[in-house]
Amino acid sequence: MSRELPFVIYCVETYKNQKGMTGAEVMDLFGRCGVVGYIRAFYDSLHLIGPKALVEDLDDYIGSRPSA
C-alpha cells in the first residue's frame, strides 16, 4: 500500500464531513476534477496542514479545474 492511500481516504472523509456530502458525491467530484492525482502529487505538503486548510486547498484546486 502506498503511503498516500490512507491520506487520500482521510481527505475524502474530511472533505465529506466539512461539506456535508456523501462519500459517493465526494468521489464523483474528486474524479471529475482529478483531485486524487493532486493529493498524491502534493502529499508531502498537504499532509502537514490541518483539516480546515486542507479543505480550503482542495476547494481552490477544484475551483481551478474546468470540469468543476
Image: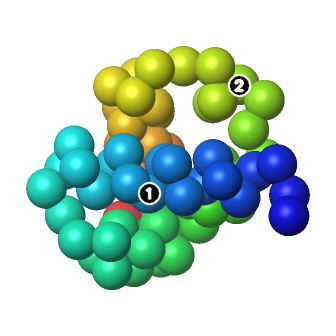
The residue lying toward the viewer, choosing from 9 and 68, is 9
The three-letter code of the residue at mark 2 reads Ser
Alpha carbons under labels 2 and 1: distance apart: 17 Å
The three-letter code of the residue at mark 1 reads Val
* In the rendered image, the vertical position of residue 41 relative to residue 45, given as above or below: below
Name the residue beneath numbered marker 2: 45
Q: Is residue 54 visible?
A: yes
The residue lying toward the viewer, choosing from 19 and 67, is 19
Q: Nearer the viewer's eye, disc 2 or disc 1? A: 1
The residue lying toward the viewer, choosing from 25 and 33, is 25
Q: In this view, does 66 lie to the left or right of 47?
A: left
Coloration mode: rainbow
Percent of width and height locating residue 38 = 66, 51
Percent of width and height locating residue 68 = 36, 65
Q: Is residue 64 visible?
A: no
Q: In which quarter of the image is residue 5?
A: bottom right
Percent of width and height locating residue 7 = 63, 47
Residue at screen point 38% across, 54% down: 13
Residue at screen point 75% across, 50% down: 4
Name the residue beneath numbered marker 1: 12
Say which element carries label 1. Answer: helix
Residue at screen point 49% across, 48% down: 11
- Total of numbered circles in the picture? 2
